[in-house]
Amino acid sequence: MHPWFASLSSISPEELILPRAQQFARYVNLHGNDSAQVTGIMRFPANGMEIMIIDIKTGCGQHPVYPLKRTETLAIVFYPRDTAPSVLSTREDFPDTPHQNWVPENCPFSICIDDRAWEEASLTYTSAELLQRIFLWFTKTSKGELHGADQPVDPNFFTSIYDSLLLESNFFTSTPEETNFRYRLDPCGPLESARFYTLKRIDQNEPPHPVDFSAVTLSIAPEDMTRIRKAPNNLSSLNQVMLERKIDLVHTLKEHIRALDSSAYGSFLILIVKIPMLHPRTHEVSGTNIMAFLSLETIGEVGKTLGILDRDPSKPNSYGALIQEQPILPNTLETISFAPCPVHQDFDPRLAALLAGRPNNNILSTLLVGAGAVGSGVIEPLFREGRFKLTILDDDILLPHNLARHTLSRNNVGKFKAESLAKHLQAIMPTLAPDYIVINILKISDDPKALSAIKSSELILDATASVPASRCICDLDSNARRLSFFYNPSGTVAALLVEDKDRKIDLRCLEAHMYSTVLHNETVKDFWNIPAVMTSYAGSCRALTTRLAASQVQILSGLIAKKIGQVLKQADAKMIFWGINEDGSVNKIESIPGEPLPVTNNGGWQVRILPYVGQQIIKKREEKLPNETGGSLLGIIDIPKKRVEVLGIIPPPEDSIESPVGFTRGTAGLYDVVMAAIARCNNEIRYIGEWHSHPEHMRNAPSPTDIEQLTFLTFTLGEDGYPGIQIIAGDDGLNVVIGQMDTGAR
Amino acid sequence: MATITFFPVGNADTSLICLANSQLILVDYANMRDANNQNDKRCDLPLELKNKLAKHKQADFRVVCFSHLDNDHVKGMGDFFWLEHAKKYQIDGRPRIQELWVPAAAITEEGADDDARIVRQEARYRLREGKGVKVFSRPEALKSFLEKEDLTIEKRKECIVDAGTIVDGFSLDKDERVEFFAHSPFAWRVDDQKIEDRNQNSIVFQATFIESGIETRAIFGGDVDSETLSEIVKTTKRHKNEIRLAWDILKLFHHCSYKAIDSESSDPEAPLVPIEEVKWLIETQGQTGCVIISPSDVLPEKNKKGDNPPHIRAAKYYKKIIGNKDGEFKVTMEHPTKSSPKLIEVSIDSRGASVIATIGTSIGTATSIPTRAG
């Protein structure tokens, strides 16, 4: 039996005090049968631990993966405080397997039978379950099945005087100048109940504190790594562990202490060690663990033990550097104690990407335009996935009613959304802290910071839910890919428009695709027409906001965010609608818009045609040959930017005349059709002109009759500031003719 | 993965092999329990087997092997199985026997009674039909029997398994992942005997299982004694076929009788000394971590004269050997406790053989005991 048990006192079953120990003893005696038998009971007088020694039949097969025995003698340790029992092996040669806990030197090996927190495990804890878990551990370990393929193999860390440590900075890129940095353990919560400490760097000008630390970082190379099973707790054993892994700790500490200012000699050391995790059988490196060791003696004492410092007899607790290094006296390294402490690395982009299931932590420099409810709801999950180095652009202020759907809090009311959102995200992941610019996207022409952000961005996210803003974003002088997302006013449909990587299908084109889909797809025909219930939030008639539940917004935002994560891996353009039904089910329409037909320029106006509009015109011509045919055109007109996107054709009214020598477009019901289409598309589209076909063997150049029509269109539409658009389909394809009021028809 | 289940049926034999493809091989059937005696700790065998059939989604047994016709190997079979040879056994709900294995003596024996007779009649019927039966060994008596039926050995050769051969119909390369090698009975023994000796003519076979390239072997010992075992060993060695006597699981011969170790041993007080061939078989052919199952009553602390099997001296011998091999020795009527014996399940997988541990739980207890109210 392991020598550790020699310090325990044997007791009889009647002397057991701890209820769980009593229950377990009773249970094994009644139900252990020949699979588990209590062979001894012990107590550790110093702390009241009661230990059941049991022989268990492990159920190992003849050829276990690890040299486990058919019958193992274990010690089940029950504690006076409310915590999980420990399961220890009583033999010193217990094999190294996954799922064992690190134990201090001279302690028996401890198997990890339950990785749940005790608060959760205790809810269903029974003696039977404890024994079942032990059996399961052995059965699965003997078959090599205990370790999940993606689960770290290294043991849990033995609890220490410090429960957990959070590293704020990246210690593994420290430079020599940082040697003299001081650190302090900052408790997370009240000191008397703190379990988590943050290692904070202290400003050099701050006066020393009784418990300051100087940090030493050590990295064990994967090729030098061998499994560590015992947690070293003094400088001698720590040095031995490091030497076995090709790190001369004593030498490293000497160099570090020599480089310190003498004012640091009263501080303590913290060793931060990066340890590759090895599978006990395959020795494959499955990740990295970080462990901290905190010295319980001052740097002065450590330096004295290492033979490079000595006490200054003239000043109490003071040390000075020795001119001549002294040899280390035998057995003195063991007098320098170190407390091991598990370390949590800060939540950083690497960890964020890992936990989000992203194989690489690619971070895109991204401009988020719009910090409202839509923007905040979509960007926060994506930010938590470590995806973006953000600049947030918005000039709006958070109002009280915004809290119904925004991710910000009450203390942000009255402040700029961009700034508040940036700080909110910074509080989640400081290493990826966003920047912000308080400005309206429509007014950035002279703002150097905004222009610089635009230039340097790889991705621009439009969360403005504003048509002019979206078009402005599209036109920005930047090669960055744009994505635009928004909900419909009633909050029942979310939309995501994604440009292709080459921006051949840009946001303007996608906007046209969107309206075209609304016009032709019954599922989304009411995208803008489902009435939104509005409520007033202030006295003005314009101070209205939609009544839309935060839970609904969260669903819509989640759908958009998830899809953004996916489309960023793809190159093509996409347009997606999600509709949420009353019962919570979701309908989705997803399409890959085609590249628009080449731009036609005339007099400063640019006209683009959606590809299927062009295909429709050609097809209708072919269907109607030898007759000419035609119809009216619908599209988006951006007057300030002189851009036209042709997005649909209206079939010829029934009173139209089609003949081999001409086409007369009738008027029956045309007005109503056009107005209905406009209403369906939220008044963002217009009647923009006419199309017709030429007969076979005729090219698409306008005839004198066509010129007359164009003139009519130009003058009529010119009153609203639009050009007249005429599309002619002939043997040689489509011809787009543009007529302008100021320059006349061409 | 395959499993072998050993049923606590007292000083009797019933084992169930569940193959990797879920087919079931039953070796002996001995429903020894007295249903009217609440204190009878032997299991309700029909119920247990029906549970097994349901669990493995089987309606029938792929094979039922009766190692020999002694009552403690056949009792109650006429009340359980669907049998081909007579309509009175063809009752809905009874499991069928796809293939019946019997020693040749089961065909040729005259004067069999009760369930032994039913087995004989079923075996004879199937042999006449030429299907659904495997007869182990081909003594002259079998030849004579067939001639009376206007049949020949040649015409029924596919129903006959000679000692020293692999039983047709199973393969390590197919989804059942098992192979059976017949060791006994020897035809010459049957021919030579003056009086029929069921025990010495019982079927002894080795089953080899394979999982992920790892072979695990089980020997089912019938009720043979050391003399027959000696012949088996000598014959096997003569043919340089020692691997056929390697074992990871051993279902003991004749319920842990001392006669399987040294049939001539007479001093009840002296430790048993195995004869040379048995010593070789037990002490060298058992692999590390092996399992020995004694299908027997609770071991006595001390045997009275003539009280055998089980015999405590035999048990002590086996336990000593097992202890050296980090193995396990189990007694069917002692597992997990003498007061409440339960099925012994041995699993066979890529890590070899292991006894599946059983511990009681409150749920298991509450749901397995009828409870009355009112």
Image (cartoon, rainbow, N blue to C red):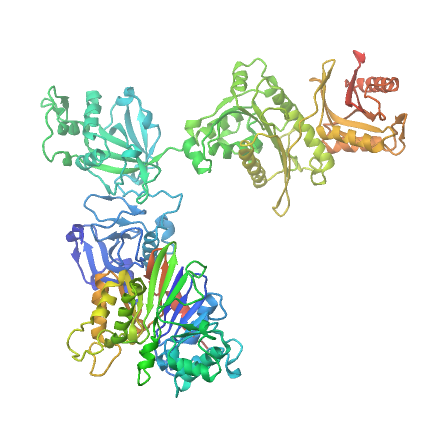
The quadrant of the picture occupied by the C terminus of chain A is: top right
Q: Position of residue B246 (x, y in %)?
A: 29, 63
* Location of residue A46 with respect to A673 vertically, above or below: below
Horizontally, residue A583 falls left or right of residue A124, namely: right
Q: Position of residue A162 (x, y in %)?
A: 27, 38
Q: Is residue B175 visible?
A: yes
What residue is at 82 percent from the left and 30 percent from the top? Answer: A621
Compare residues A66 and A329 and report the one nearer the observer: A66
Q: Is residue B358 visible?
A: no
> Which residue is the extreme one toward the bottom?
B111
Horizontally, residue A521 falls left or right of residue A548, namely: right
Q: Quadrant of residue B211?
A: bottom left
Q: Quadrant of residue B338?
A: bottom left
The quadrant of the picture occupied by the N terminus of chain A is: bottom left
* Location of residue A729 with respect to A118 vertically, above or below: above
What residue is at 79 percent from the left and 11 percent from the top? Answer: A743
Compare residues A171 and A20 and report the one nearer the observer: A171
* Location of residue A403 with respect to B193 vertically, above or below: above
Q: Position of residue A99 (x, y in %)?
A: 32, 47
What residue is at 21 percent from the left and 33 percent from the top? Answer: A243
Compare residues B82 and A19 and report the one nearer the observer: B82
Q: Position of residue A160 (x, y in %)?
A: 26, 41
Horizontally, residue A597 falls left or right of residue B215, namely: right
* Location of residue B235 with respect to A271 vertically, above or below: below
